[in-house]
Image (spheres, helix red, strand yellow):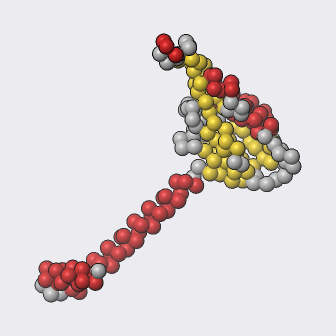
Amino acid sequence: MRLHSQRVFSILKNALGGNLHDLTPYMKRLTWLVLGISISLIWTGCESDSSRTYTGTLLQLDYSGPGDISGGSWIEIDGIRFEHIDQHEALLNTPDALPATIVYQNVGSGGENGPAERGLPESFTRLDIAIQLGNFLRRQSGDDFQYINPSPTMTMLQGRLRIRRSDEQPITVRLSDGYPITVTVLE
C-alpha cells in the first residue's frame, strides 16, 4: 500500500513539475468532499428506515387522505401486524385482517378450467378501514391495559383514528413502504 501511494505521489510530482505544494489545497478539499458525501449517505440511510416508525403516548392515524391501500400493505401497532388483503375469501378467513380499498371476489372454481377469474371489485373506503382498525385494537387490549380511542366521532366522520393506551405507556406504530396514511405523534 505504501509503495502504491509513493508511486502516485511521484507521478503527481512529475506532472506538476516537482511542486507538490500546489496539490495540497486540492487534497484537503477532496478529503472534505469524500467525508461529507459519506456522512450524508449514512444519514439518509438511517433516516429512511426510522421515518416509517412512530412512537408516542397519543397517536393519530389519518386515513382521510387520497390513494388506495393495496393488498399486502400493513400497519403494525405495538408488534401486532394488521395486513390488508385484496381477496374476498382470504379476508373472510383471516382474523383481524383489514380490507384493501379494492377487494376482489373470485368467480369460477379454477381447477381444470384454469385459474379462478377475478369478479367485480368491492370497494372499501379508507373511513371503513379506520373504523375497523379501531375495533380490532379494542379487541387486542391486554389484561392490564386497553387501547382507547378518545375521539370516536372523529374516526367515524373524518377517518382520523386516535389511539392511546389506558396505562399511558408509549405506542409504537410501523408502516409498510408506501402505506398511504399520515401518522402524527400528539403526545
Q: Position of residue 12 (x, y in %)?
A: 18, 80
Residue 120 visible: no
Q: Position of residue 137 (x, y in %)?
A: 76, 39
Nearest the camera: 22 or 45?
A: 45
Q: How many marks?
A: 0
Q: Position of residue 130 (x, y in %)?
A: 69, 33
Rendered view: 1 above or below 41: below
Nearest the camera: 158 or 82?
A: 82
Question: Residue at horizontal 52%, vertical 16%?
Answer: 111
Q: Position of residue 37 (x, y in %)?
A: 40, 65
Question: Residue at horizontal 67%, vertical 42%?
Answer: 81
Classify residue 108 as left or right of residue 8.
right
Quadrant (top left/top right/bottom left/bottom right) for the N terminus? bottom left
Residue 86 visible: yes
Residue 36 placement: quadrant: bottom left
Residue 68 placement: quadrant: top right
Q: In the current view of this chain or complex, which residue is farthest to the right? A: 144
Nearest the camera: 187 or 57?
A: 57
Classify residue 179 as left or right of residue 131.
left
Rendered view: 78 above or below 124: below
Question: Residue at horizontal 62%, vertical 22%?
Answer: 88
Rendered view: 51 above or below 24: above
Classify residue 173 as left or right of residue 2.
right
Question: Residue at horizontal 53%, vertical 59%?
Answer: 46
Classify residue 77 as left or right of residue 42.
right
